[in-house]
Amino acid sequence: MVLNLITFASLLHKQASILGSHELILNELEKYFTVNIVEYQNINKLTKDDFSLLFIATGGVERLVIQHFESLPRPAILLADGMQNSLAAALEISSWLRGRGMKSEILHGELPEIIKRIFVLHSNFKAQQALSGSRIGVIGSPSSWLVASNVDYLLSKRRWGIEYTDISLERVYEYYNQVTDDEVGEACAAFAGKALACREATPEDLIKAMRLYRAIKRIVGEEKLSALTLSCFKLIEQTGTTGCLALSLLNDDGIIAGCEGDLQSIFTQLAVKVLTGKASFMANPSMINARTNEIVLAHCTVGIAQTEQYIIRNHFETEMGIGIQG
């Protein structure tokens, strides 16, 4: 792992004395990382793919940093071991950056804690890189009760490199009607055979739900989607089924899938995947107990791979289609 230290030092200090005064922290960093000392004049030679910290090597560098404001990595992580009045300078710089809307953090203190924090920051950096270029399909529109879950598509593209793309439900209906019962019969039998039980749902319900899964998966391939959110309730009127099974199976396929056209939840699910490498599921907080430190989450579906066992149910609100109890 390469760690670029964009070094800001006062012109009053000689380069040799600067590195010598920070020998302790630099030697410790070199045990874990390939350390690349980059003088601030060369900051533009680094790219957005380079993991970089601002190494505040001395005091008196506040003006130097703000002169390079546009070129600084975002967020700005300032490393200051306290030598040569560096911590005071880092605090002043951090305050200035925050006042202009840039997130910043100062790394200072015990060396083992600094090393641990750098590993976390590097993980976050790699996750943000992984998010860039992702495409989220918005099939239908957000449910009416999601009054605080809007997303600015343009800002998402500019800030994160994530593209939201609207897909009409009519396209889903078209593909759904093209899938025959015979095409999904074997998949339905396999799915039902692995279930612990089947409660309210009928074989016809399962066939419809599996046809919907095939239709949506076709769109995922055509649109090259990394994730999708589905306007589930509007589907019921046209298909007589819900998207619960489709979303469950898509998550197992590695396609992050969420319900209700919830734009922010699907963003969060995608972020969870790149940070942890694991799938998540969208759920409502049903109960919180502060005394026992417990929270109960519930929803109409979950990825099969996330469960130990599953029961085939119907959809909670409509009592139609297929729901997954894990």
Image (cartoon, grey):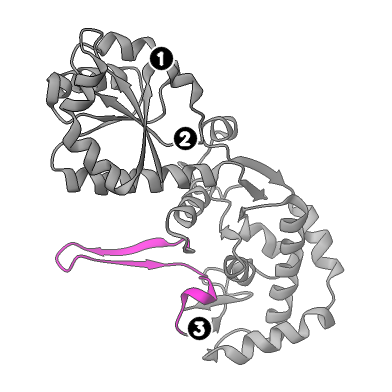
- Residue 132's place in the image compared with 16, above or below, is below
- Residue 198's place in the image compared with 286, above or below, is below
- Rendered location of residue 136, percent (x, y): 62, 48
Q: Describe residue 181's horizontal placement relative to residue 95 as left or right.
A: right
- Rendered location of residue 291, percent (x, y): 14, 65
Q: Which mark is residue 41?
A: 1
Q: Nearer the viewer, residue 63 or 207?
A: 63
Q: Amino acid at mark 3?
A: Tyr
Instruction: Read off the residue under disc 2.
Output: 50
- Residue 318's place in the image compared with 58, above or below, is below
Q: Amino acid at mark 2?
A: Asp
Q: Nearer the viewer, residue 259 or 205?
A: 259
Which element type, helix, strand or loop, lies under badge 1?
Answer: helix
Give the label, 2 or 3, closer to the camera. 2
| Residue 296 sits inside the magenta stretch | yes
- Rendered location of residue 132, percent (x, y): 56, 41
The stretch of residues the image draws in magenta is 280-308
Q: Could you tell me which residue is drawn at 65 percent across and 49 percent down? A: 137
Disc 3 to disc 1, how far (Cα)?
Answer: 59 Å
The image quarter in which residue 35 lies: top left
Give the label, 3 or 1, closer to the camera. 1
- Residue 254's place in the image compared with 270, above or below, is below
Residue lying at the far front of the rendered structure: 16
Instruction: Read off the residue under disc 3.
Output: 310
